[in-house]
Image (spheres, rainbow, N blue to C red):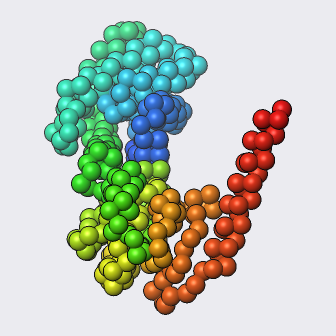
Amino acid sequence: MSQELLRTVMDFAGSIAMICLLSMAYGTVRRRLPGISLAPQLAGITFGLVAVLQMHAPITPFPGMIIDLRNIPILLAGAFLGARGMLSCLIIAVGARIGIGGVGLASGVVSMILVGGLGLAWDAITAGPKRRGWKAMFGLVALMSIHLVALVMLPYELMMWFVSFAAGPLLLTYAIVVPVAGMMLENERMQMVSEARLRAVARTDPEATFPTRKTLEAEASQAFATGQFAKGVAAIHMSFRPGLAHSSFWGENVRDLIAVSLHQRIAPLIPEGVIFGQVCDDGVVFLAPENMALGMDGLAASIRRDVVTEAIRLPGSAPSHPRLTVNRVDYEGLPDLEDLLDGSCDGTEQVKTPVRFVSDGSGDKRLFEMAERLIAHHRRTAERRAHSTLERRDG
């Protein structure tokens, strides 16, 4: 008897663990594919596969009584993935159930269809920006119980046996597993709501992040035209890389969010008269007239000392330090605007050349050799382009 009880407990634990892992997979898929139209379908396929596994790993609490939790993944797909995700899940689950066959085939298929629809109905009733709590989750359990009407499609004796012996343990199992798994999925949903808000802020609120490259180009052009940079330019080229914890969690959108956090920290440190902007995905440039060189030295030191020391916290991931590179650059005379702005970006196609002095915090050093190599590279590129143009004309 003790062995049977242990086996039953292990069966329950395995099924619940599988559904909990499903909840984690949901968050991973949706986070890795934000905004992609196939994300609900891919998550739905995952839910459907778990439903199939549940069919083939039933729980036997008593001899002659078989319970499986196939309907829970289908219910959760309807409640959290929307119609497309639920249909993907349902197609896989129904196909597997048809393959199994048996006297309960029609009842089982109708039951799964009802459960998916009930999940969609619950989502339509409760969806909103606020967190859905335990009361809503138990409401989902109560709504799910409606699917038992499919029992009328069973032969009478089998239906009465199920109602008398299996329905109670099955509903008790639902009452335990569905709220727990539902709260895990709800936490993921709220996490994604938070992420979506951050992304929206990063992309639409001009005050929340660094000015754009176009804004900086306009301000720099005006400074050139009015002679503010006539004697030279004191600049800071800053590039940043997200930490591993942020990259693995947020994916391709992480740089926008890191930029928002860095802007919040750096903006109060910027002296009056400095113009700045984000010139590429991971590069920011600060520009000031040559007579503000000491102030720019202080700003660079403050960024290195104060901004990087404290880890950046983004929702859902561990605090992480971005990898920050800060270079103080003095340009003699009037540098080319493109050269001035692209010094913070990666790639030889973006770094233009006429740098005179660079300080990385350990002292100034000349970069004439680098400048000569870059000038030669761009000269060769220009010659190849001119030669190609002449060939096309001659042809």
Residue 12, given in percent of the width and then of the height, sits at: 41, 44
Residue 253, given in percent of the width and then of the height, sits at: 42, 50
Badge count: 0
- Residue extending farthest right: 395
Residue depicted at 20% across the width and 39% down the height: 129
Residue 67 visible somewhere in the drawing: no
Residue 133 vs residue 115, the one in the foreground: 133
In the visual, does 236 lie left or right of 295?
right
Residue depicted at 32% across the width and 62% down the height: 226
Q: Is residue 341 above or below residue 87?
A: below
Residue 310 vs residue 159, the one in the foreground: 310
Residue 207 vs residue 26, the one in the foreground: 207
Q: Quadrant of residue 351?
A: bottom right
- Residue extending farthest bottom: 363
Residue 211 visible somewhere in the drawing: yes
Residue 3, given in percent of the width and then of the height, sits at: 47, 51
Residue depicted at 20% across the width and 35% down the height: 128
Q: Is residue 130 above or below residue 144?
A: below
Q: Quadrant of the C terminus?
A: top right
Residue depicted at 48% across the width and 83% down the height: 359
Residue 224 vs residue 28, the one in the foreground: 224
Residue 202, given in percent of the width and then of the height, sits at: 32, 50
Q: Is residue 45 above or below residue 211?
A: above
